[in-house]
Amino acid sequence: METFVRRIRFRVKAFSILLVVSMLLTVSIAVWQYSVGDVTGTEGMGDFYKGLLKGMQIGVFFGVFVAMLGFIIQYAKALRNETSMRKLYIEENDERNRLIHFQSISVSFYLIMGCVALAGGIAVFFQAVVAFTLFAVLLVMGLTLLLSWSYFTKRT
């Protein structure tokens, strides 16, 4: 149980550092963009799309921020209360939950690969740059799958 407590303390520190660094990075990039001007390559786009891109950037950051903050709060509460820590330990180390988690990740990965391949196949008819980008993403996903598969087959 002591190793689990150390792992939770490490997570709190890591998420806190990531939260501060990502916040500083996002704010500094936003300030730089507004001071320098449009550096996103959206010169030919209308105001709607420029606003959409900036709003998406802020929305993604805010979503990650809320998720990390939620984990920090959950882990900090568990560090203060022994029963919460035991409950978290059981929740993370339960074999049934771990199996469900790993199976859902595996199915999601294959589903996303299929969707990226389908989107790349459709994008070929509209814009070559988007199609090449999607195929590059598919290649990286395939290499990731191959490398992780070879690592885990040698490990077990």
Image (cartoon, rainbow, N blue to C red):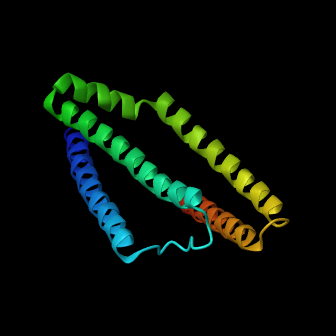
Tell me if residue 156 comes above or below residue 74 in the rendering: below
Total numbered labels placed on residues in the image = 0
* Residue plotted at (79% across, 55% down): 118
Quadrant where the N terminus sits is top left
Q: Is residue 156 visible?
A: no
Tell me if residue 130 comes above or below residue 109 in the rendering: below
Depth check, front residue: 30 or 92? 30
Which residue is farthest right? 125
Depth check, front residue: 58 or 146? 58
Q: Quadrant of residue 143?
A: bottom right
Judge left or right: residue 126 versus residue 25.
Answer: right
Depth check, front residue: 33 or 129? 33
* Residue plotted at (51% across, 71% down): 40
Depth check, front residue: 17 or 65? 65
Which residue is farthest front? 47
Tell me if residue 91 comes above or below residue 39 in the rendering: above
Q: Is residue 105 visible?
A: yes
Give percent across and percent down for residue 145.
62, 60
Which residue is farthest left? 80
Q: Quadrant of residue 84?
A: top left
* Residue plotted at (28% across, 51% down): 15
* Residue plotted at (47% across, 73% down): 38
Give percent across and percent down for residue 5.
21, 40
Give percent across and percent down for residue 41.
55, 74
